[in-house]
């Protein structure tokens, strides 16, 4: 077997792996980046980008459907499914091509194509034909869609994020299994594109939204156009028209769908890596235990980053973790701790749902909550997008912002402001002294901040603007 030597080997050329390779090489390390496909990242090929492209088409439907409200008369609308999906793929392919071009710009010999597994803590075998010996190794193998056992038999009817964007036409009906961000984003986009959709989840409420008031509020809004069945066990069997979904729980029922979209989680892709041979400690799910500030696994020469560690499976965290892991792999055995970002996630539904930090378990002694509604907010009313509610959390002392759960129009922007405030340790009173342009959705935040100031007896010396 051919044997090659390097300082840092990275398994996986996704967002985390690319960032790890770059930061290790910037420190002078000889690197190898191993990937089984070099097809482009999950984000560009089957993740963030194509899903948002489908949402963009659904937004166009919404704009046409609402046009009448603004006095704009349109003719009858028709949705050209093949054209919708063609644009999704065409734009997606541009993003993916840009990622692939970035591989071509890497120095010769960095990229090694093939599936890798560990032989021991410092040795990888690629495709059974090449051995790589490395001083340190970064695991950046990403995640893959979970296929629950009760659906395994229905393989050709199953859609996941890996094949849904390859459809030539929109299906007539889809059962979406899983009400997390991936399931909800695609489900709402499909329903707006006139596909019959129902979302199912075992959980009694939408998973991942810890603030119960906002969860109920969001579910009520989105549930008006998208049937969501929660707290049920789902069974599936093949029928002539596709698949019969039967569900049991508080509300039993059954419905036939053409396809099933599985969005029941994306566990890390660690199988086949032969992690046992490395002797690093694994948790009960088989995920390496690691230090979240250094990304180092059990004090060893192995590091982990991105979806592979299953902690914050979003793109900016994959990039951050990748670059931290790459840097520490290059300087191993000396490693340094990175200060983590304030956690931030956005669900690109309409209204959007964003979460910053962690919702407090109990409001009261240590945390106060400022709330604001979009029902009568100026900018939201103008654009007929006046639905939503936000909760901003702060400490019950000086009113330092600790997080927020936001449901409303374009709350991705306010969520960024809150995340920056959390990371910069800013108080509600300090935030209120910063500029808010008029009339914007961002002004919707002010009422919540003022409430925090009131509750913490801090100064709120800004002036309310009409319709803010
Ligand atoms: C539908 C969908 C929508 C999303 N939307 C958003 C969004 O809007 N915003 C956001 O922030 N995040 C979003 N995400 C999440 C985001 O895409 C991921 O967090 C991010 O892409 C993870 O990057 P990664 O580098 O960890 O993994 P990946 O990009 O998946 O890279 C892993 C690579 O490792 C390779 N690999 C695996 N095992 C081996 C092996 N043994 N040998 C060799 N190579 C191997 C894989 O082929 C792959 O190329 C979305 C995800 C999905 C699925």
Image (cartoon, grey):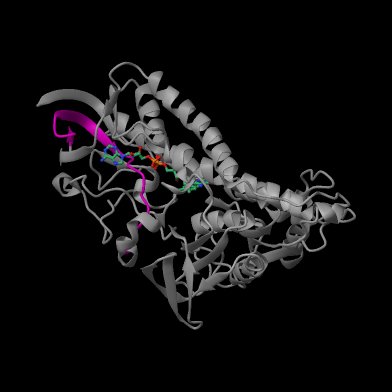
Q: Position of residue 154 (x, y in %)?
A: 34, 61
Residue 179 appears at what percent x and percent y?
50, 63
Q: Residue furthest bottom?
A: 250
Q: Looking at the rendering, which quadrant does residue 353 occupy?
A: bottom right
Any magenta on residue 139?
yes
Residue farthest to the top? 108
Which residue occupies 14% across, 34% down? 128
Residue 302: name its quadrant: top left
| Residue 40 as seen in the image, left or right of residue 429 | left
Q: Nearer the viewer, residue 136 or 386?
A: 386
Q: Which quadrant is the C terminus positioned in?
A: bottom right
Residue 309 shown left or right of residue 194 in the figure: left
Q: Which residues are magenta?
A: 122-148
**As rendered, which of 303 and 72 lies closer to the eye?**
72
- Quadrant placement of the N terminus: top left
In this orientation, does residue 7 appear? yes
Q: Is residue 210 magenta?
A: no
Q: Is residue 349 left or right of residue 163?
A: right
Q: Is residue 254 above or below residue 409?
A: below
Quick check: 84 above or below 323? below
In this rendering, the answer to whether 397 lies above or below 73 is: below
For image coordinates 75% across by 50% down, the residue present is 64
User: Where is ligand 1, by quadrant?
Assistant: top left
Residue 455 shown left or right of residue 43 in the figure: right
x and y percentages locating residue 221 in the rendered image: 67, 66
Residue at 58% over, 67% down: 211
Q: Please name whichever residue, 383 or 88, is drawn nearer the observer in this view of the structure.
A: 88
């Amino acid at each position: 077997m051919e044997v090659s030597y390097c300082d840092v080997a990275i398994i996986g050329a996704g967002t985390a792996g690319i960032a790890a390779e770059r930061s290790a090489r910037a420190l002078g390390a000889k690197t190898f980046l191993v990937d089984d496909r070099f097809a482009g990242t999950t984000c560009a090929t089957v993740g963030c980008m194509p899903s948002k492209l489908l949402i963009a088409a659904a937004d166009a439907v919404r704009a046409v459907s609402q046009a009448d409200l603004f006095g704009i008369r349109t003719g009858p609308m028709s949705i050209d499914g093949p054209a919708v999906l063609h644009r999704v793929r065409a734009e997606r392919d541009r993003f993916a091509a840009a990622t692939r071009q970035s591989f071509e710009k890497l120095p010769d010999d960095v990229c090694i194509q093939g599936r890798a597994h560990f032989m021991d803590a410092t040795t990888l075998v690629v495709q059974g034909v090449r051995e790589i010996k490395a001083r340190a190794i970064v695991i950046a193998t990403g995640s893959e869609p979970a296929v629950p056992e009760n659906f395994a038999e229905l393989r050709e009817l199953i859609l996941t994020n890996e094949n849904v964007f390859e459809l030539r036409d929109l299906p007539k009906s889809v059962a979406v299994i899983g009400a997390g961000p991936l399931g909800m984003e695609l489900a709402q986009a499909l329903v707006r594109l006139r596909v019959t959709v129902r979302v199912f989840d075992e959980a009694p409420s939408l998973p991942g939204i810890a603030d119960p008031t906002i969860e109920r509020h969001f579910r009520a809004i989105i549930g008006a156009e998208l049937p969501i069945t929660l707290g049920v066990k789902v069974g599936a069997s093949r029928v002539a028209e596709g698949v019969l979904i039967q569900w049991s729980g508080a509300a039993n029922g059954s419905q036939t769908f053409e396809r099933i979209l599985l969005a029941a989680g994306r566990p890390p892709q660690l199988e086949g890596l032969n992690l046992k041979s490395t002797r690093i400690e694994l948790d009960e799910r088989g995920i390496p235990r690691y230090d979240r500030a250094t990304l180092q696994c059990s004090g060893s020469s192995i590091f982990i980053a991105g979806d592979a560690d299953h902690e914050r499976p979003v793109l900016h965290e994959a990039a951050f973790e990748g670059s931290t892991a790459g840097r520490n792999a290059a300087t191993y055995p000396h490693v340094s701790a990175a200060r983590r970002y304030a956690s931030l996630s956005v669900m690109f539904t309409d209204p959007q749902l964003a979460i910053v930090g962690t919702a407090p378990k109990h409001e009261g002694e240590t945390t106060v909550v400022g709330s604001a509604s979009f029902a009568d907010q100026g900018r939201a009313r103008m654009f007929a997008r006046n639905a939503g509610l936000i909760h901003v959390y702060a400490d019950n002392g000086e009113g330092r912002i600790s997080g927020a759960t936001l449901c409303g129009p374009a709350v991705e922007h306010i969520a960024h402001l809150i995340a920056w405030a959390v990371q910069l340790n800013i108080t509600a009173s300090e935030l209120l002294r910063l500029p808010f342009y008029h009339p914007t959705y961002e002004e919707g935040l002010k009422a919540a901040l003022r409430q925090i100031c009131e509750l913490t007896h801090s100064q709120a010396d800004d002036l309310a603007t009409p319709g803010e």
